[in-house]
Image: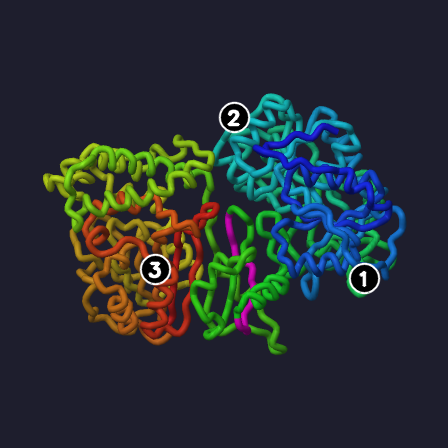
Amino acid sequence: MDLITSEKSIENIELSVLEQIPSGERILVSLPNGIMLARVLIHAYTSGIVSVPVSPSATAKQISFYADHSEATFLYNKQGLNRLNNAYSNPLDNKAAFIMYTSGSTGDPKGIVLQKPAIEQNARVLSNIHNFKDGHATCLPLFHCNALMMSLIGSHLAGTRLFIQHRFDAYDYFANIRKHRIRTATIVPALLEELVECNPEWPNCLEYLITAAAPLSQSLAKRFYQKYGPRIRQGYGLSEAVNFSFLMPKLSDEDFVRLYIDNYPPVGQILPGQQYRILDSGEVVIGGETIMNGYLKNEEKNRETLTADGWLKTGDVGEMRDGLLVLKGRVKEIINRGGETLYPVDIEKHWESIGLRKPFAAVQIANEKLGEDIGLCIEQGGISDLSMLRKLKPYIPSAVVCAPLKTTSTGKPRRRDMGAKLFSITENDIKYASLLSLAADYADSVISQIGGQPVTVDSPAGYILREAQRLVAHRTAIDGRNTNNSLVEAAPAMQLQKMLVDNINSLVQGEVAGEDIVRKEKGLWTRLMCEWPMDAYARMTADFLIANRLLEGKVLEAGAGVGNTTRLIADAINSDYIRTDCNTQILSKISVRGHCEFYDFNQPGNWRDLDTIFSVNAIHCASDKQATLCHFYQMLKLGGTLVLGEGNNTTNNAGTPWALNGLFGLFDGWWNVSGFLQREEWLQMFITAGFREWGYSQLRSGEHDLGGVLWAVK
């Protein structure tokens, strides 16, 4: 097998140190994804050593558990090979090749014992179907079953080239597939979302992509088909059955549209060497040559998971349609985050170890790109410091609710109920990176244009210059990512950026105001607030209001402006809806149910007993934000809800500013009062104002936390 990688530098490893490990011994492998990990795993596999591959991000406590539970006698990590003081109490037969750890719904992680005959049966079937002899690529981590069992072992058995994408990047992945003449490649839906949006040119050598680990949605299948045709094959399987058990055949255009776009996408036909049954409960069970030997040291779980005749209970509900398996959902309340299976109890154990105080619960929340994401429901007093919410790695929740937990009569958390109306949004990493990069280019131009001119500190120009310098100071980190300016150049924000550069000297000299610049292009202000990236805040707020039925009573919108949110909720509001702004003339430009009124949210309002107050990207302009929240509190009825759509001033741990901070310095209320705050500041003000419950949902792009929607209940 010829291993190829996208890694810029590869650590040299001396495989001879592994020769001291006798056949049958167990080695815990905790290495970053790449060539080094691949070589260690293949050496162990061919030498009869049982490998226990785990994520390099595993904590010291997790590593200790894996080592003790697997009874590994060696540990291979970035520091090299280390001898462990373990002795066997649970011998394995000489066919065992891997112990793969997967979290259990309760208790400690489970160790899946996989034998060589089962692995090779599965890997050979798949390498033959996908013709690995013509080259294969993966962008998935080798310490997970898909990449390890199919891509690595399958390529090894086929004696072919395997390209390992060290870190996923849509453009790099396709460029490397083209460069190395790869015929088939793996992906998961979360990464497929990014690939479809970036739309790199399809490599002529690539026959199709193979996707699994999470369901492929109709929406994503349609968008993929519109750009690339039917060149994707979905599969399904579990680590307990080595890898794939079902795989879709290659489809014609007509069949792809019928099966994937007009209907919920199926996961395929059973693979040779395996069988399936669907129980009366709807649960899919699998039998055959690839089923695990069992969970290590867990007979109770073995009895739960394996039937008396050795069939595997998948925990998934399914049905057959046109001879193809269609999955209908999960039996248990696991969180499937972009193909990564996460169990709430394990997440909660981690959170508690960091300092969260019970009662709290990890719940499933919706995320269009990832399928599901992690939510946290916690009661008052469970968080000693709001900044702790950013320190819960690797399980940082993307939605948080601080309110009494919903439980069953026996005290068990009703996770589905608590997470049912929560969601987060994950945007294209490359798209936002492109926005940041282009904004930094414009910031360079602003600094260059101003040159040595004196600039009044307390002025729009002074604010814009400071933010330009702040953004450029993070240039190295910003330029470290792939970008594609064509994804963002047409955005109204970029059009206004160019106008800002063209007019910066006039702004410095006080000849024009920011409003004068934006008025040069008719409709630009409305487009700026209603199109990407600003539209995301309005969409999140509208979706939250509608999902939680917060528009059914007496509702007030503060700082409604051009109606970026109003337009999205028009069908859901009633005659009691009150739309307010300091500029009532702008309110008249769109017509919806309810009525318009003047309201300056810097002052107390005359309304009382409101059910809902909401505002999007406006309240940060309040001269005294704490006072404004107190005004809102007084206007709400007991149990009433305040909802805010707001961004974050800085978006990552490195302190990178939000891409458009400087641009919005053109406008009064931003440069002279306040731009975006940080989420923790809003939450603290909610608490200070007296709200009894609060929560938020994130808008994310890669490492960047862009803010999102916040809410509080009186």
Span of residues in magenta: 357-368
How far, Cα to Cα, is label 2 from label 1?
49 Å
Q: Mark 2 against mark 1, which lies toward the viewer?
A: 1
Looking at the picture, the colour scheme in use is: rainbow
Left or right relative to 96: residue 384 = left
Count of numbered circles in the view: 3
Q: Is residue 321 visible?
A: no
User: Could you say where residue 558 lies in the image, as x and y percent from the top left?
Assistant: 26, 60
Q: Marks 1 and 3: CB-CB under 8 Å?
A: no
| Residue at the disc numbered 1 | 297
Residue at the image point whose x is 35% and y is 63% from the top: 681
Q: Position of residue 191 (x, y in %)?
A: 55, 40
- 661 and 491: which one is in front? 661
- The answer to whether 117 appears left or right of 696 in the picture is right
Return the x and y of residue 392 as percentages of the image width and height: 52, 60
Residues packed near mark 2 inside 10 Å, few (<14), some (14 to 19) or many (20 plus): few
Badge 3 element: strand
Indicate the secondary structure of the residue bearing disc 1: loop
Q: Nearer the viewer, residue 411 or 391?
A: 391
Say which residue appears at 19% left-offset and 62% top-offset: 599
Instruction: Indicate the amino acid at tag 2.
Output: Glu
The tag on residue 644 is 3
As drawn, the residue found furthest toward the bottom would be 409
Residue position marked by numbered label 2 in the rendering? 201
Look at the picture and state if 358 lies above or below 265: below
Frontmost of labels 1 and 3 is 1
